[in-house]
Amino acid sequence: MLSFPNAKINLGLQITGKLPNGFHTISSCLYPIPWCDALEFVEAKKTSFQSTGILIPGAEKNNLVLKAYRLLKKDMPLPELSIHLHKAIPMGAGLGGGSADAAFILKALNSHYQLFLDDSLLEDYAAQLGSDCPFFIRNQPALATGTGTELTPLDLSLKGLHLVVINPGLHISTQMAYTGVSPKPSDINLTELLLSKDFDRWKKELINDFEASLFDKHAMLLDLKNELYDAGAIYASMSGSGSTMFGLFAEAIPLKPAWKAMQSQQFLLD
């Protein structure tokens, strides 16, 4: 069975608190975008995993796709599988690619083997794999709160806008990104702000809290954001804990040669 796990961007990201267990609470809108990996499995005598495309660091046995399969197999009568992941979404980039891969194999197994697990139960499985994973079960715009696993559907559409996504190849660990932020309660009504689609307000109020410290450490990220605005973006930001930058445009634009030298894509959102 073949599926195409897609990435996401964050529209705003406030770090609102820190829990006794060390995890942080957030407020953010997760929005799916059509930058995709390819994931396929077939039945086999022995379970195996291989990947192509972008090189995935670490041992294959630790890949989230394999972890997701084994997590579900503990409770469900699944056969041995040969799993192939073609990686196209940059990693350590704030795009949630690994989380999407894990969620999509849960969904594909549920569908293919008629396990009849509802989305809520699949989200429970996904939450055991990572904070972004549950979002990709329903894969629709959602307000993420708590540790990122508390999801509220948001009737937000950016259909018709052009999205430019640029990843400069700078790997930023989530742990490192959090060391530069000071949690504070948010005084922004994120739902109201997003649904207003007032992009002048978005520029001023729809902030990613990771930007301030990461821009100080990596000036190229601020440069990319400014370049997106100079190219006519109606809104530009960093996604997640970085290092991907994105811009929303009313019309398609030519990608600059410097962007093309990085991992960059342009999409018409639907």
Image (tube, rainbow, N blue to C red):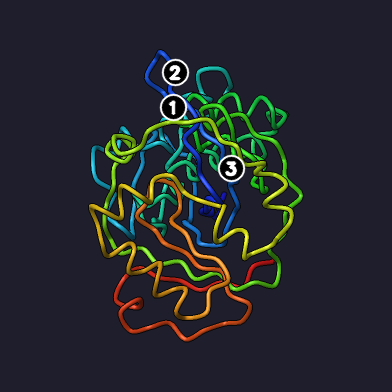
Residue at 49 percent of width and 24 percent of height:
128
The image shows residue 132, relative to residue 165, as above or below, that is above
Residue at 70 percent of width and 60 percent of height:
197
Q: Are marks 3 and 2 in contact (CB under 8 Å)?
A: no
Q: Which residue is mark 1?
A: 24
The amino acid type, in three-letter code, at marker 1 is His
Where residue 176 appears, x then y in whole percent?
27, 38
Residue at 70 percent of width and 36 percent of height:
152
Q: Which residue is mark 3?
A: 136
The amino acid type, in three-letter code, at marker 3 is Phe
Callout 3: 10 Å neighbours few (<14), some, many (20+)? many
Q: Earlier in the sequence, mark 1 or mark 2?
A: 2
The amino acid type, in three-letter code, at marker 2 is Leu
Callout 1: 10 Å neighbours few (<14), some, many (20+)? some
Question: Is residue 125 or residue 196 the one in the foreground?
Answer: 196
Q: Which residue is mark 2?
A: 19
Q: Are marks 1 and 2 in contact (CB under 8 Å)?
A: yes
Which quadrant, please, contains the C terminus? bottom right
Horizontal relation, residue 122 to residue 236: left or right: right
Location of residue 109 (image quadrant): top right
Q: Earlier in the sequence, mark 3 or mark 1?
A: 1
The image shows residue 33, relative to residue 209, as above or below, that is below
